[in-house]
Amino acid sequence: MKQQLSKFIHSLLILSIGCAISFSAVAAEGTNTILGTKHDFTGLNKRAGVTAMSGVAFSDYGTSCVYCHIPPEQEGADSTPFGGIEGWNRFTPATEHSYDLYNSRTLENKVHTPSPISLLCLSCHDGTMGVDMTVFRPNGWRSSEDAAMHLRINGNNNMMNCAKCHNGRIAHNIAIKHIGTDLTNDHPISMRYAGLSDKDLDFNLPDGPYGFNNGVKLYDERVECASCHNVHNPDIEVLLRDRADRLCETCHIK
């Protein structure tokens, strides 16, 4: 009995130390986490001050990560045979080949279809699919009990707008988050970064193979939505990787 009690206390101490280390790591990291951000769907109710969103406007899967990432219990699963974006837990937008991307005479490395990582962002922000339309759901999720409306990010003043479900009034302005499929007035994406050699005097050389020291990233040498926006970081407005007044100067010399 005494030996069992000793083992129990030892296990409890190990657990306590582990928890202390985990909490210390979170404290050291600060608020640089998806929890509580606009991409944390499990926290939308608390942030918006409402109680009618999860289960009505969208399905709350109980964890923030699965709205983009393949659930841990499905690790290694391929979403593409089910119509998913390669490497992600979102369906490929039906408009994948119908985006109007930025174009100009001086733009090099022109592309016609966004890369998978930018398609991931667009799968919500183009307004064509519900924000909870994931390929895989967590284990234990009962689709038969799903009564959500699966609303979209929609800038129109109608009931398809996922921000208009409270007393018939818009709960918060979501129009700025609805990018649509016309990206001609947005920064170009999915093209190879022109500053990868010192031949183009209009662009800075990256600090390393993955981008710049201030956090601006390159993905397979390409500029993507996530190059400038850190979806996990609520510390900077509009989830930018640096202050807006310094962000452009990261890449552009003039």
Image (spheres, rainbow, N blue to C red):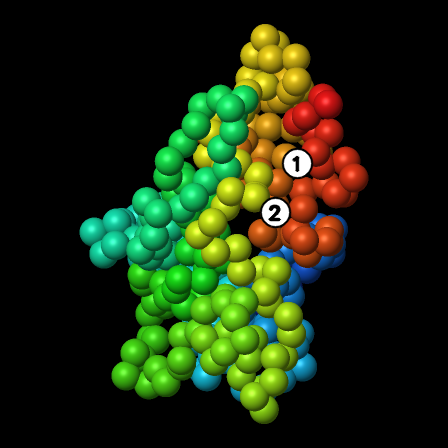
**Whole-number angstrom distance, CA of label 1 to CA of label 2:** 9 Å
| Whether residue 188 is visible | yes
Question: Could you tell me how many numbered marks the image carries?
Answer: 2
- Quadrant in the rendering for residue 142: bottom left
- Quadrant where the image shows the C terminus: top right
What type is the residue that disc 1 sits on? Gly
What label sits on residue 230 in the rendered view?
Answer: 2
- Quadrant in the rendering for residue 66: bottom left
Q: Position of residue 242 (x, y in %)?
A: 72, 41
Give the secondary structure at mark 1.
loop
Contact (Cβ within 8 Å) of mark 1 with mark 2 = yes
* Residue lying farthest to the left in this orientation: 81
* Residue lying farthest to the bottom in this orientation: 167
Q: Position of residue 156 (x, y in %)?
A: 52, 70
Residue at (64, 66) in percent of width and height = 36
80 lies left or right of 126: left
What type is the residue that disc 2 sits on? Asn
Which residue is identified by label 1? Answer: 215
Residue at (25, 54) in percent of width and height = 83
